[in-house]
Image: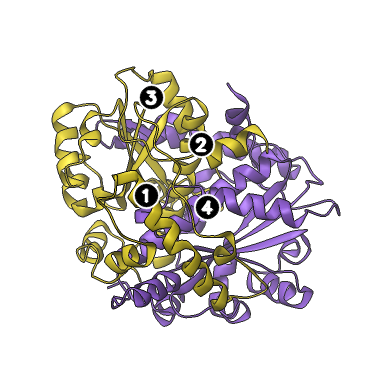
Chain colours: A yellow, B purple
Amino acid sequence: MNQTIALLKSHRSIRKFTEQAVSDDLVAEIVACGQAAATSSNVQATTVIRVRDPETRASLAACAGGQPYVADAPVLLMYCADLSRSAVACDIAGGEFHPGMTEHFMIATIDVALAAQNAVVAAESLGLGICYIGGIRNKPQEAADLLKLPEQVYPVFGLCLGFPDQNPEVKPRLPLSAILHEEHYCADQVVSGIGDYDPVVREYYKTRTGGTKDSNWSQEMSSLVGKESRPHMKEFLSMRGFQMK
Amino acid sequence: MNQTIALLKSHRSIRKFTEQAVSDDLVAEIVACGQAAATSSNVQATTVIRVRDPETRASLAACAGGQPYVADAPVLLMYCADLSRSAVACDIAGGEFHPGMTEHFMIATIDVALAAQNAVVAAESLGLGICYIGGIRNKPQEAADLLKLPEQVYPVFGLCLGFPDQNPEVKPRLPLSAILHEEHYCADQVVSGIGDYDPVVREYYKTRTGGTKDSNWSQEMSSLVGKESRPHMKEFLSMRGFQMK
């Protein structure tokens, strides 16, 4: 196991940071590492907005459901999927932008995730801790307004960065056999993998919460996919110009 | 610049591989590194299908538009967004799966991209080269059939892996100023960034193709977003159970 692999395997979200500042140069380096990730047809659909203003950050924290680190982490980066830049380029080249395609939405969203994950690896290699803030999609229109996003841009998630002031354990994952299949999808591996994983998750929560949380993966998934999730998303994306044609 | 950052910044797609085999253990390690990435609400929506069968690989290569490395690379991994596993878990817990939400689709797709990018970093740290195969979405239903995917699972992209038999230069990216904004979106930075980048891209293509490709980024974007892209995608996703509600 080399150093990079050890780093990848040691990831856990950090939600409590020391007051040590992260220099602008370091942030630039981290975002640039994101740029180095693969990008579909070189579209480079990622825009990162660094928010420093305490009021804006408090408002974004409220959008995300009140997580205090969104307001307080040394660095908050808002990762946005941006087809506006490509539309501008298309205009420069005399072409006519074709908005609203599902595939373009997917390309842009995947691009952002690849860039962000590279940035995360870079940050962690520098001793920083990170936390993705998907909760920003609770109130995405408010976030888009705060960030003054033009059409064809939407906030995918936030990313909090800073030097860790906690050391949580790495969360156990599904057994590899539930994830990695040979030749074709194998439902049996999935069922048996869940069976093996459920007690592991229950034990993890028990240990982590001193016994107050008693739940397994199946129960967590039942909470997650057993109900509507952000039902505003379709309308929000459509308003931003992502009509899923 | 530490070793991991140097690695991230040296990424370029590899499309020609030596015949050196990649061991099953190495593939398992790479996929496991993907599992270590952040995942929204621990949903772990990534399923990886390793395809070895030459006929299936040839068919997948045809789906992707005939790229020979899809058939020939030492390893082909198909990265799929999988909410079926969560649906099974939900059923185990006695819940009722709520299919078709846009947000669930996004969570699953982003999850796959985060896991894949971690796997890519792991692979490159081991001296392997990689190439994402988004082209699989040219004929996603054929790919889904070949992989025997159940409902609530779709192929996001393929990933070719192997030891590099070429050493292409790193592709230049947009200037950081076009990507990284402060406090809010800054359209001026975008326009001036494109202006700086267009001649760089033209020079890159000229050098790389010995003068036969004469195009800049704006022109490339005009080709990409100036027309419909995979117009079958909406219907395909809907048929898989991702109705974008």
Instruction: Quickly name the residue at label 2.
Output: A121
Instruction: Quickly name the residue at label 1.
Output: A81
Establish whether labels 4 and 2 are both on one chain.
no
Q: Chain of mark 3?
A: A
**Circle 3: residue type:** Phe
Establish whether labels 2 and 3 are both on one chain.
yes
Residue A214 placement, left or right of A71: right
Q: Chain of mark 1?
A: A
Establish whether labels 1 and 4 are both on one chain.
no
**Between marks 1 and 4 in the image, the one whose residue lies nearer the viewer:** 4
Image location (x, y in percent) of residue A200 = 45, 57
**Circle 2: residue type:** Val
Q: Chain of mark 2?
A: A
Q: A19 or B132: nearer the eye?
A: A19
Instruction: Quickly name the residue at label 4.
Output: B35
- Is A185 placed above or below A199 here? below
Q: Earlier in the sequence, mark 2 or mark 3?
A: 2
Q: CA distance from mark 4 to mark 3?
A: 23 Å
Q: Earlier in the sequence, mark 3 or mark 1?
A: 1
Instruction: Quickly name the residue at label 3.
Output: A163
Q: Chain of mark 4?
A: B
